[in-house]
Every structure is written in structure tokens, then in C-alpha cells.
Image (tube, rainbow, N blue to C red):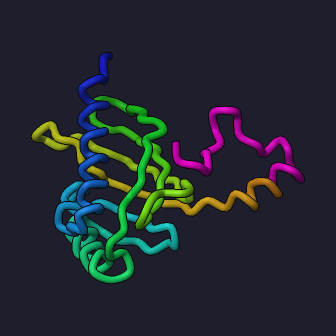
Amino acid sequence: MDRTDDIAAIGALLDELVDAWDRGDGAAYGAAFTADASYITYVGTRYHGGAEIGRVHQVLFESFLKGTRLASQTISIRFYGADVAVALTRGDTYKKRPRRWRKVQTFMLVRQGDGRWKIAAFQNTMRKPLMEVISFRFQPASKPSPSGPIQDQPA
């Protein structure tokens, strides 16, 4: 099955998410999510639904995240049937320029009745490269395959 159009649509949705962040537009950010989406931050906070995700991000854009931009790079998109996809990205927030990819994100996307893709679940994880090095040194068999490690530096 040719998924070129779906990959392009999902890529455009993820680009819209970055654009909304960069503009500090919580409503547009939340609009990328389903009404019942689950959103887990890297500190473990859970938000429910696109409206709440947008509302909370607007508060953050006006305070802690004011003036930040979002760096994001898609690592993979995998499909599970016609209407479900999982995207893995790496990225970070920054003010002047991104220096490291400190976070890894997992998006679960679903195709809506109108054919548009929306984010149904999001998980953001802060990487701990030093802990990875220690783990791999003491348990070398725990090291991921060559395609597995997430790079620290932006391309």
C-alpha cells in the first residue's frame, strides 16, 4: 500500500504543531490533537483532550515557555492499519538555536472521519545520555541496534 500521501499529511500536521509552538498559539497547538487525546509531558504530567492541551500550552507560552521555539525531527512513521500511525521524533525547545536533542517524543495518530490525521496520544521523554552510557557499559547487551540510539546533536 502506498502511504506517501499519509506520510505527507502526518508530516504537515507535525509541522503545524511546531509552527503553533513557535507563534505561541495554544489554540492552534491544541487543535492538532483529538478531543480525547492523552498528552504526557517529560515530567509525567498528563493532560486530556485537545482543548485542555491548547489551554495549558497558552498559559505556558505566556510564562515559562515565552519566546521559545520548538526543534523537531521525525525519525520514523509506522502504520498499524489504514487509520492508525505511530511517529517517533526527537527535539527540544530553544530560544536562539537548538543545541541538543534532549527529548524523544512518541505520537499516536488517528485518521478522523473527514480524512484528516490528528494526534490521539503523545509521550515526551527527557533523554539521560550519561545514564545510557553507564547502562551500556555495565550491561552491553542492553545497547540498542545501530538504528536505535537517538542522536544528541541537531543535524
Magenta residues (range):
135-155
Residue 147 locus on image (x, y percent): 63, 33
Residue 138 locus on image (x, y percent): 89, 53
Q: Is residue 2 magenta?
A: no
Q: Quadrant of residue 150?
A: top right
Nearest the eye: 34 or 8: 8
Count of numbered labels shown in the rendering = 0
Residue 122 locus on image (x, y percent): 39, 57
In the displayed image of the protein, which residue is found farthest to the left? Answer: 114
Residue 63 locus on image (x, y percent): 33, 83
Residue 61 versus residue 119 in the image, above or below: below
Identity of the residue drawn at 33% across and 38% down: 84
Residue 90 versus residue 78 in the image, above or below: below
Q: Quadrant of residue 77?
A: top left
Identity of the residue drawn at 43% across and 41% down: 74
Task: Please name the predominant secondary structure of the magenta segment in the image.
Answer: loop
In the displayed image of the protein, which residue is found farthest to the right? Answer: 138
Identity of the residue drawn at 61% across and 51% down: 152
